[in-house]
Image (cartoon, rainbow, N blue to C red):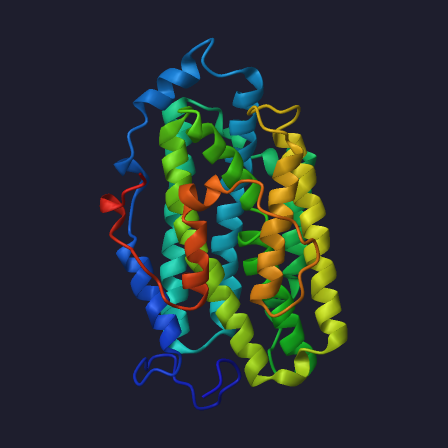
Amino acid sequence: MPIINSPKTDPNKILPMTYTWAREYYKSGIANTWTPEEIPMQDDIEQWKSSSFLSPKEKRLILWNLGFFSTAESLTANNIVLAVYHHVTNPECRQYLLRQAFEEAIHTDTFIYCCDSLGLDPDEIYTMYETIPSIKDKDQFVVDLTQSVDDPEFTTVGEKNIQKLLHDLIGFYVIMEGIFFYAGFAMMLALKRQNKMVGIGQQFEYIMRDESLHLAFGCDLINTIIDENPSVWSLDFQAEITELIIKAVKLEKIYAQDACPEDTLGINSNLFGEYVEYVADRRLERIRLKKVFGTNNPFPWMSQSTDLNKEKNFFETRVTEYQTGGALDWN
């Protein structure tokens, strides 16, 4: 049965399964269960309160990333529950979407935990999507990309509507979760490599593992819809999607320069832009489009820090070396 628009699909009947890859993502997510309270924050609190351990620019970088992610995770959860779940009626895919929604709730809780631990002003953090232009532009770009599936009158019947669904799914999974999160991940893990704010860095590593699964599931969902409706994947539509991803990269590079100016971490801040280009090329290839940038990975240590090298296994639905969150070893 097709993954969308099947009159025979009973969302309440999960057996027999049609898409076993969706079930594998669900089981991998369950194996990676974690909560932010598992990670001690005392050292982070002392570093944050110290007048000399973190520079003002490093504190600014942390605030910028907490501000972006705290609202981005809520936006992601709302998209799953209010839009994607409604249009993807296959039961095993829906089971994973429920799991993903739970993980987004954990991520949201993570930023509550970080803000409470550091004694941050929630009004400052949770309004940055309105007050910081580079954050506002990214959030608005994704909101604009997902207008169709949020429309209560929207239907996935017909070629044009399937293209609209794919357009929004790519905006949600490939751009939001697959590109817009990555400069921030690299910044926070660069801090952790310097033994700064290690608790927050560990939480970002856990989130990164979750997001790798979300991204992989989303790409498999997108590719399956295309396989079952090949006429929608026209050359013009492919060019439209490629242009969206190019624009997303530009916005993420602006954010990277804004959040981490003037080599704040002892790293040429332009390298964060190169990293985003490298990541975007991988996303393009994952949905069967050609690379645009041809940029090498300037941060090979990210593969060790975030298990980015396992994304290939995730994308091939061959998840390896996963454990329950409390037992994960990041050495």
Q: Quadrant of the N terminus?
A: bottom left
Residue at point 35% right, 62% down? 319
Q: Residue furthest top?
A: 51
- Taking the view exactly as shown, the residue that stands out farthest to the left is 327
Q: Position of residue 139 (x, y in %)?
A: 63, 47
Determine the residue positioned at 49% across, 87% down: 6
Residue closest to the far right: 236
The reply to whether residue 136 is in sight is no
Is there any visible trace of residue 53 in the rendered image? yes
Residue at image position (52%, 38%) is: 186
Specify the quadrant that holds the C terminus: top left
- The image shows residue 252 at horizontal and vertical percentages of 65, 44
Query: Residue 148 at x, y = what percent?
Result: 65, 67
Task: Tell how many labels.
Answer: 0
Q: Quadrant of residue 239?
A: bottom right
In the figure, residue 107 lies in which quadrant? top left
How far across and down, in percent of the image, does residue 160 sit? 70, 79
- The residue lying toward the viewer, choosing from 169 and 268, is 268
- Residue 209 in the image: above or below residue 136: below
Pick the residue in front: 284 or 30.
284
Q: Nearer the viewer, residue 287 or 109?
A: 287
Q: Residue at x 58, y 34 (%)?
A: 127
In the displayed structure, 51 sits above or below 226; it is above
Q: Is residue 249 above or below residue 154?
A: above
Q: Nearer the viewer, residue 93 or 306?
A: 306
